[in-house]
Image (cartoon, rainbow, N blue to C red):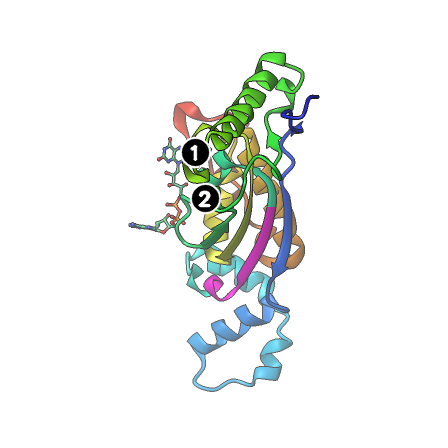
């Protein structure tokens, strides 16, 4: 590897949950009680044991606005700029990403591609040529925000994503489906593992259409 060559890995999204409510079951219990009772005792609500059935009913009845009270913030590393373009299509959420305008982008970020191409010399050369072109442009006095136009989609980005549980249900339902590209599916599965641990009552019930109801992909269905 010469000085311009950077590390290229398979898709290994790294997700850290940095903020989530302490007791999501109780938030749902309280919001359900508010809809049904003029007065309620906060302590009794916190001890509710019926929450599993309630969450299932809320999903079935599509009374999902209650899940908007559960907020998550994830710190995400080792994802590509292509994944950034896809995840930011999910408008119900907040995003902050590393800037190719302010950062010297060749120095600190790696690349990911499907690991079946990692030993393909043409793919590796193409990525290295792209980063070399970026360096040449920078040395020639081209600004960071213009030089970045030659960087590949495979380059990594750091991302902060804040999203509520209702929007996450939509995200996971759409993005765990096999119609999505490999990196997105791996990323969605990583997010799913984290939220299942935090709020199993809800997220054990969430998955692609084929898991939750039935596939709607018609001819494009993977049939699995
Ligand atoms: C397999 C797959 C392939 C895809 N391919 C492409 C592609 O080729 N090209 C492409 O451009 N996109 C593509 N997308 C992106 C897709 O079209 C959506 O933009 C993306 O999945 C975000 O979904 P969303 O709008 O439901 O999410 P959000 O933006 O988070 O919105 C959540 C929900 O809020 C409501 N909502 C949000 N904004 C509005 C609005 N303005 N008006 C009315 N209701 C609103 C809707 O009910 C929506 O489902 C693809 C997605 C998948 C899963």
- In the picture, measured across the screen, residue 15 lies left or right of residue 150, that is right
Disc 1 from disc 2: Cα separation: 12 Å
Q: Give the vertical position of 189 relative to 32 (above or below).
A: above
Q: In front of the other: label 1 or label 2?
A: 1
Quadrant location of the C terminus in the rendered image: top right
Main SS type for the magenta part? strand
Under circle 1, the secondary element is: loop
Identify the residue at the far right of this view: 1
The one nearer the camera, 25 or 189, is 189
- In the picture, measured across the screen, residue 135 lies left or right of residue 11, that is left
Mark 1 and mark 2 lie on one chain; the one further toward the N terminus is 2
The one nearer the camera, 156 or 85, is 156
Q: Give the vertical position of 128 relative to 87 (above or below).
A: above
Q: Position of residue 87 (x, y in %)?
A: 47, 43
Q: Which residue is mark 1?
A: 142
In which quarter of the view is residue 157 placed?
A: top right
Residue at 53% x, 44% y is 103
Q: Which residues make up the magenta segment?
A: 67-76
Ligand 1 positioned in quadrant? top left
Residue 71 forms part of the magenta stretch: yes
The one nearer the camera, 102 or 116, is 102
Q: Position of residue 98 (x, y in %)?
A: 52, 47
For the question of whether residue 213 can be seen, the reply is no
Q: Which residue is mark 2?
A: 101
For the question of whether residue 195 can be seen, the reply is yes
Crowding at mark 1 (Cα within 10 Å: few <14, some 14-19, many 20+):
some
Residue at 60% x, 31% y is 111
């Amino acid at each position: 590897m010469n000085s311009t060559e950077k590390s290229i890995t398979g898709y290994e999204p790294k997700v850290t949950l940095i903020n989530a409510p302490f007791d999501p079951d109780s938030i749902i219990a309280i919001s359900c009680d508010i809809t049904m009772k003029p007065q309620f005792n906060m302590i009794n609500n916190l001890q509710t044991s019926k929450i599993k059935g309630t969450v299932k009913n809320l999903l079935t009845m599509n009374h999902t606005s209650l899940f908007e009270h559960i907020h998550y913030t994830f710190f995400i590393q080792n994802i590509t700029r292509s994944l950034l373009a896809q995840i930011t299509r999910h408008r119900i959420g907040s995003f902050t990403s590393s800037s190719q305008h302010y950062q010297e982008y060749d120095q600190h970020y790696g690349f990911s591609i499907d690991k079946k191409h990692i030993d393909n010399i043409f793919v590796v050369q193409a990525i290295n040529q792209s980063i070399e072109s970026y360096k040449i442009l920078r040395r020639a006095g081209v600004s960071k925000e213009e030089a970045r136009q030659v960087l590949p989609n495979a380059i990594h980005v750091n991302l902060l994503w804040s999203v509520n549980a209702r929007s996450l249900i939509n995200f996971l339902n759409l993005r765990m489906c096999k119609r999505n590209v490999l990196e997105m599916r791996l990323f969605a599965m990583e997010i799913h593992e984290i939220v299942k641990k935090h709020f199993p009552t809800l997220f054990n019930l969430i998955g692609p259409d084929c898991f939750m109801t039935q596939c709607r992909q018609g001819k494009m269905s993977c049939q699995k």
